Image (tube, rainbow, N blue to C red):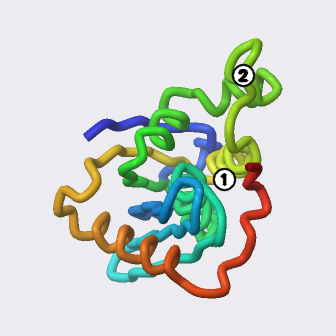
């Protein structure tokens, strides 16, 4: 398991923040293709499952969207441990890639644009509200909540009447 903490949220009231555990996953039937996301939020004895999808998107967009939707569902600033099988998501946040891309005008380097800047912008905003520790887990390794997220994401991707992904550019 790879861990990384993003301490972009205000830390002065950290002790008062509630601890929430989130599991996320994204799926795409073809890449690009119809995609879905799934998230499981755990707080004490409470559990919430979220899912949705788009008719044409990418797997990476769904991985990021799963985390975005879950973090946006939190009503108060929280301390969050977020588990994902997406190394792209975990590394971009825990290694500071997304912050660097933003600081460079959404460029990965002098010639290449960063991919998915619309989603990374929202992720950075949510990480200023919450204190998030991103943890990578191997996909399809039997972790109960990660497997449930996968089922939610695949079911959403197979749904009918999926909306357009407003940020996807093909």
Residue 128 picture location, percent across and down:
67, 46
Q: In the displayed image of the protein, which residue is found farthest to the bottom?
A: 160
Which residue: 55% across, 59% down? 62
Task: Where is residue 66? Give x, y as percent.
Answer: 53, 62
Can you identify the residue that label 1 sits on?
A: 126
Percent of width and height locating residue 65:
59, 59
Viewer-side residue, 166 vs 65: 166
Identify the mark at residue 112; answer none if there is no mark: 2
* Quadrant where the N terminus is found in the figure: top left
In space, the residues marked 1 and 2 are separated at their CA atoms by 25 Å
Which residue is drawn at the image coordinates 38% and 72% (left, top)? 42
- Looking at the image, which residue is at 60% across and 53% down? 61
Q: Quadrant of residue 72?
A: bottom right
- Circle 1/circle 2 CB separation < 8 Å: no
Crowd class of label 1 (few under 14; some 14 to 19; many from 20; radius 10 Å): many
81 lies left or right of 78 = left
Q: Nearer the viewer, residue 125 or 140?
A: 140
Neighbor class of circle 2 (other Cα within 10 Å; few <14, some 14-19, many 20+) is: few
Q: Earlier in the sequence, mark 1 or mark 2?
A: 2
Instruction: Classify mark 2: helix, strand or loop.
Output: loop
x and y, in percent, of residue 40 in the image: 41, 72
Residue nearer the viewer, 121 or 17 = 121
């Amino acid at each position: 398991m790879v861990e990384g903490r993003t301490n972009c949220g205000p830390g002065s009231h950290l002790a008062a923040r509630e601890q929430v555990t989130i599991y996320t996953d994204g799926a795409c039937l073809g890449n690009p293709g119809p995609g879905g996301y799934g998230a499981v939020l755990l707080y004490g004895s409470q559990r919430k499952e979220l899912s949705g999808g788009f008719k044409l998107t990418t797997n990476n967009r769904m991985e990021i969207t799963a985390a975005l939707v879950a973090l946006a569902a939190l009503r108060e600033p929280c301390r969050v441990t977020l588990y994902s099988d997406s190394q792209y998501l975990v590394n971009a946040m825990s290694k500071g890639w997304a912050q660097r891309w933003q600081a460079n005008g959404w460029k990965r380097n002098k010639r290449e644009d960063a991919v998915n800047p619309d989603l990374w912008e929202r992720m950075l905003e949510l990480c200023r509200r919450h204190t998030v520790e991103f943890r990578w887990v191997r996909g399809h390794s039997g972790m109960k909540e990660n497997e449930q997220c996968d089922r939610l994401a695949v079911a959403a991707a197979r749904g009918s009447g999926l909306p357009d992904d407003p940020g996807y550019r093909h």
